[in-house]
Image: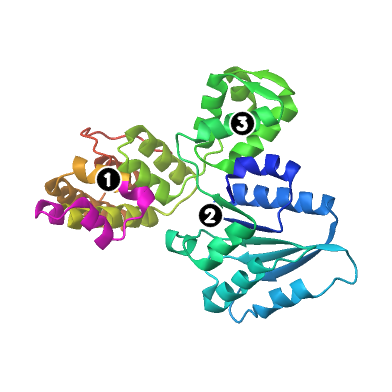
Amino acid sequence: MKLKPEHIPAHLQRNLAPIYLVSGDEPLQVAEACDAIRVRARESGCSERLLFNVEAGFDWNALLQARDTLSLFAERRLVELRLPGGKPGEAGAKVLREYAARPSGDDVLLVISGKIDKDAQRSKWFTSLEKAGVVVQVWPLSVAQFPAWIERRMRAKGLLPAAEAVAMLAERVEGNLLAAAQEIEKLALLHGKGAVDGAAVSAAVSDSARYSVYDLVDRALAGKTAAVTRVLRGLQGEGEEPVVVLWALSREIRSLTIMAEELRRGVTLEQLFAKHRVWENRKHLVGGALKRCPPQSLRRLLRQAGQADRVIKSVTAGNTWDELLQLALGLAGSSMVRRIAMIS
């Protein structure tokens, strides 16, 4: 069966399956799902833990040998198989199918994997594990899902948040689940159980947003000019190298320029996405940017990127972060021509 991460606690109260597959690239949710399974396994008598890391040269038969060998120290064991790449290969797929066909009567198998793509989800090894046990797929939370996740977590800690408290915390940590979890823990400690309003959050929570250049690009593609300014200020304050910021913006602008020209010649959006390997979760961002930015605007942005490069290299006088801000705002579709003082 398949379960969402938030449904794991209720499931474990009722049952403990012989096999769990937890996959995804959101570290906090993956870790917490696995921790919940480990705790339940210990409570059920799994006092020994075997750990297998799948890397180059890994002997997959060791998993079957563990299944078929009784422990000298414990009646039940938790067997963890870590599969970072999400692809077991031919040998691994065969062993996983065989294990799923005849799980250990006493042990619990926990497979921890990186993101598993759609093709792999249709494979026999994946469907065999799903049929024999429980599959938990963790996906990064969208902006729309994040406040609900925060509210659930606050309520689990005994906090009763007002809508403004949830919104304020979501804005402060901006998508960083680990930071949100830490701030909720701190808030519960400082405030105690009960109603929480915006003032309480403001007093207790620090601004924990941490950004990457990819966050900046995505905000720009989404046309969120205020968020672009905030993220760029965050990158500057965190000491990000300007050349890295320029590289990320320039790469996206060059890619969009090529796609915009092809779109103008009659190529469809889906054909473009397939040709340029645009991920499913980014299609709406790229498609929106292409609708917003005609080819001539993108060519102008490329010239701006060249100007920013010259400023970074001190060939031309100017403020490096000011130039990067203008470039990012241009990608976001801002028609404003202005200079915004950045953090010095």
Horizontally, residue 23 falls left or right of residue 286, namely right
- Residue 87 picture location, percent across and down: 52, 69
Find disc 3 in the rendering and name its residue: 152
Instruction: Please tell me which residue lies in front, 301 or 101.
Output: 101
Task: Tell me the crowding category of disc 2: few under 14, some 14 to 19, or many 20 or more residues within 10 angstroms, Cα based.
Answer: some
Mark 3 or mark 1, whichever is nearer to me? 3
Which numbered marker is on residue 327?
A: 1
- Residue 311 picture location, percent across and down: 28, 52
Q: Earlier in the sequence, mark 3 or mark 2?
A: 2
Give the amino acid at mark 1.
Leu
* Cα separation between marks 3 and 2: 21 Å
Instruction: Please tell me which residue lies in front, 77 or 25.
Output: 77
Q: Residue at x 71, y 58 (%)?
A: 18
Q: Which portion, as a residue range, is magenta?
A: 261-283
- Residue 46 picture location, percent across and down: 83, 58
Find disc 2 in the rendering and name its residue: 25
Horizontally, residue 74 falls left or right of residue 276, namely right
Instruction: Please tell me which residue lies in front, 83 or 194.
Output: 83
Q: Earlier in the sequence, mark 1 or mark 2?
A: 2
Horizontally, residue 342 falls left or right of residue 34, namely left
Q: Quadrant location of the C terminus? A: top left
- Residue 31 picture location, percent across and down: 65, 51
* Cα separation between marks 3 and 1: 38 Å
* Cα separation between marks 1 and 2: 30 Å
Q: Earlier in the sequence, mark 3 or mark 1?
A: 3
Is there a contact, CB below 8 Å, between mark 3 and mark 1? no
Whether residue 276 is in magenta: the answer is yes
Q: Residue at x 75, y 41 (%)?
A: 13
